[in-house]
Image (cartoon, rainbow, N blue to C red):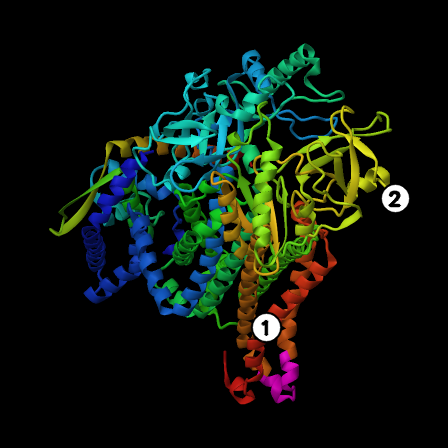
Amino acid sequence: MARDNVDLLQGTLDVLILKTLAAGAMHGWGIAQRIQQISQDVLRVNQGSLYPALHRLEGEGWIAAEWGASENNRKAKYYRLTRSGQRQLEAETESWRRLAAAVGRILQTA
Amino acid sequence: MKSTLARAVRALRALLQRRRQERELDDEVRHHLELETDANVRRGMSPDEARRAALVSFGGIDQTKEDTRETWAGRFLEVLGQDVRYGLRGLRRSPGFTAAVVLTLGLGIGANTAVFSLINGVLLKPLPYARGEQLVVVRQPDAHSSTADLGFSPLEVRDYRDMSRAFDGFVEYHSMDFTLIGGGDPRRVRAGVVSANFFDVLEVSPLLGRTFRASDEDHGADAVLVLSHGYWRSLGGDPAIVGRRFEMNDRVHTVVGVLPPIPQYPNENDVYMPSTACPFRARVVDNRRARMTTAFARMAPGVTLAQAQADVGAVSARLRASYPDAFAPGTDAHVVLSPLKDDLVQKARPTFLMLLATVALVLLIACANVANLTLARLLERARELAIRSALGAGRARLLRQLLTESTIVALAGGALGLLLAWSARGLLSAFAARLTSRASEVEIDGAVLLFTLGISVLTGILAGTLPGLPGRRKIADTLLADNGRTTSNRRRHRMRTGLVAWQLALSFILLIGAALTLRSFDNLRRVDAGFRPDHVLTARLNLNFSTYLTAEHRVDADKVNAFLRTVEDSVRQRAGVVAIGAAWTFPLNNAFQNDGTFTIEGRGETAGPPPKATFIGASGAYFDALRVPLLRGRTFEERDQPGGPGAVIVNQRLARRHWGEADPLGRRISSDGGKTWRTIVGVVGDVRQEGLESEPGGTVYLPFREFPGYAPTVFVRTQDDPARAAEDLRAATRRADPQTAVSGVRTLEDIRGEALSSPRLTSALLGLFAMLALVITAAGLGGLIAYSVSQRTQEIGIRMALGADRRRITAMVLREGMTSVFTGLALGGAGALALSRLVSGLLFGVGPNDPLCFAGSAVVLVLAALAGCFLPARRATAVSPMVALRSEA
């Protein structure tokens, strides 16, 4: 199963988290599941780096956390995108697009 | 980017909420695992299997938590706190290591703090006057007779003040000894005689009363005094002293103010008086050639030294044109400005900088030792570090831990050093006082504290990072796998050897420096100053000169002679007095300057500079009392008095310089351009009048009875302890004239000792620092060898089992130590050769590359190194082969 997985590039986890949360508040496990689903199991989130990343983004003020009840009625920590997180997401999306386009062009011509 | 303040606030708040944060992290992770387990169950696993799979997919829970904590705000402080706590615990566990390191660093930092307090007080601090950088000393050197400063006459100072434009103030200063009468014994006071606006130019405000104002210089103004802070204190520190009256120079002087406790420039005075009140100045005030004062000026704001220099240069040219007779023919005088601060510290600077370089090297050596000790301890702690690494401490965290520990010990060392420097502060300012009048500004102030803190932290960082440098990439891995035999370990050992070699090199340099200063001190100590200092008491008899004036306001030589004869006869009555002589000054007195030019009868004007000599009045018995050898002719006799034959005595140097081997007796010289001639009646040995290190120049002795002056210095040679003659001298003086102040009572041995005290202290300090460095280095070398021996226990055991005897093992261990020593000698020798030229100015009678000093230092270093290696070598031979072979380490 690990065969088709792609390790996340350094720094890409942050933008994926921000994008995921743009759809609405979510807890850690949910975020990991969501990224995996949408990428059709190509991207597999390493949990060892998920929580440090969440706490770091929280520290930067891009996401905020609050406790609420989860689907199975347990206490869960829900993260949501803040306004400055929204701006950060836009900025990172833009720079990601530019990078991807540039890499794509190089791969086509080479 | 958030502001630093906001970050700090967030960090603090986060720290306070840390417990809740921890609990929430636990909940969050647990929740994640539950959801994952549920999902696995839904995929069809059994509950147990589902849970295990969830745990596996999550990975190292503790590692993840630790990584997450690292992102928390305020984490840095928290980790620091943990590291400090952990470090303290570790240090408590090895008190020997801690004590050794704190002591080593304490000595190193203490020495640096002490020397920095000197440098800060004397060289770095601005002058304690407002805008002190604008103050300049004005000098008038004469290139023709190579005189450093002719001085200024009062008229010249007035002209410079009126004609220059670059200055806010231009003032005159001279210092005189007067006798203060009123209450108890007459006291000699050193009076600074200054322009009325002197203190305004320096911008000094009085502590009590006022300083001078322009009206104090008016004709017929009341005589006023301003007391120095020190003199006021010595009078009892009466807060109501303003208005008190003293009699001085036959006039009543009223105290109008007291100065604050500032250092006084250019020298320390007891009292100050306005220039017009000085009776000596009043006599020559119209004479442009009577250059008795020193000039100071304050440059106007925005004026540079070069501009001010150009300004006085122009004034000087105009004055030369207006008053062609103001200078002796042939004089080539010009005016030169120099910043007051440079002037005051000129003598201290090279010595202080050499001390600074020395203590910096000592600290570097101490640092290397601490790094070595830390490295050794690191290897001992390999297992502990490996466990911490396994528990999730990252490489950076481990290095940070090391750094924290070394900073803790360095700070403790800094505190110890501060204590050492603080307890030595009295000694330090006494030392500085011999080199500069800024000595009283030497103190442990904020700047010094900051410096100490700074070098402590720096030392900690240096000592803490050095051990981590090699194998930094794999510190955790190697320590984990370490059984004492890894490559990185060998690299560490090589690094330790290198550190020790550098320590040895630096110690060698310091030893050479100390040896050079010790030798030059020894040379200075053995200098033959041209007189016999033993068994001679000297004192200055300060006459109340106003009662010794002729009708023409000149010195009444007959009256002074009568006084002096009474004193001499009375002292001679005392048993054990061999001779009593008098002169204008005592030998080795660098403050006495009375250089002048003269002409020799029958020799026309030559192209070169005119003959120069120091003129000193001395009585015939002076040469007996000081045991200055009479080489030709006679010394002065009673007939050499006013109206006498006009005799002079010259010293051997002057006789040789101008007459070679010919006999100078009967030749005549003139010091006033040929108006009057004096006959040479004797030639005496050379006396070092200016100081031990200055070669005696030409000296012309004038008959004291003809030119007695108001403050004769007397010399009493006794058979017994000369100090015991002091009371007789005082009593005799009191009987002859109760208004005479007796000052400077001490023996010639004291004067000679005083002249040696500054070089003695300098060489003692350098010697002390070099010894300190040597001990530290020897201990470091010993530690290294001991470690190496402990690592080679097995090898040594095998060698011994195969028949190597103790001597061979000892030699093997010593050889290892000596390899470092010879590397150190080569490096240090090269370094010393490169550096020694820098100190040549501080040396006396020894070259900077003196082979004896180099060789001697090398021997001392080798002996110290052998001593350091001896103990571990002994331990090596004590290894029992059986034990060694069984030891698996």
Query: What is the CA distance from the residue labelled 2 to the residue labelled 1?
Result: 58 Å
Which residue is at the front of the view, B561 or A64?
Answer: B561
- The numbered disc on residue B754 is none
Which residue is at the front of the view, B298 or B868?
Answer: B298
Say what amino acid the circle numbered 1 marks. Ala
Locate residue A58 relative to residue B753 in the image: left or right.
left
Main SS of residues in magenta = helix
Residue at (49, 64) in percent of width and height: B375
* Quarter location, residue B682: top right
In the rendered structure, the residue with mark 1 lies on which chain?
B
Q: Is residue B839 magenta?
A: no
Q: Secondary structure at mark 2?
A: loop
A65 lies above or below A101: below
Q: Secondary structure at mark 1?
A: helix
B582 lies above or below B126: below
Q: Is residue B130 visible to the viewer in this orientation of the structure? A: yes
- Label 2: few (<14), some (14–19) or many (≥20) C-alpha neighbours in 10 Å: few
- Label 1: few (<14), some (14–19) or many (≥20) C-alpha neighbours in 10 Å: some
Residue A43 placed where, x, y %? 35, 47
> Which stretch did the figure color magenta?
B797-810
- Return the residue at label 2: B661
Residue B53 placed where, x, y %? 27, 62
* Quarter location, residue B777: bottom right
Residue at (53, 49) in percent of width and height: B729
Residue B737 placed where, x, y %? 50, 40
- Return the residue at label 1: B867
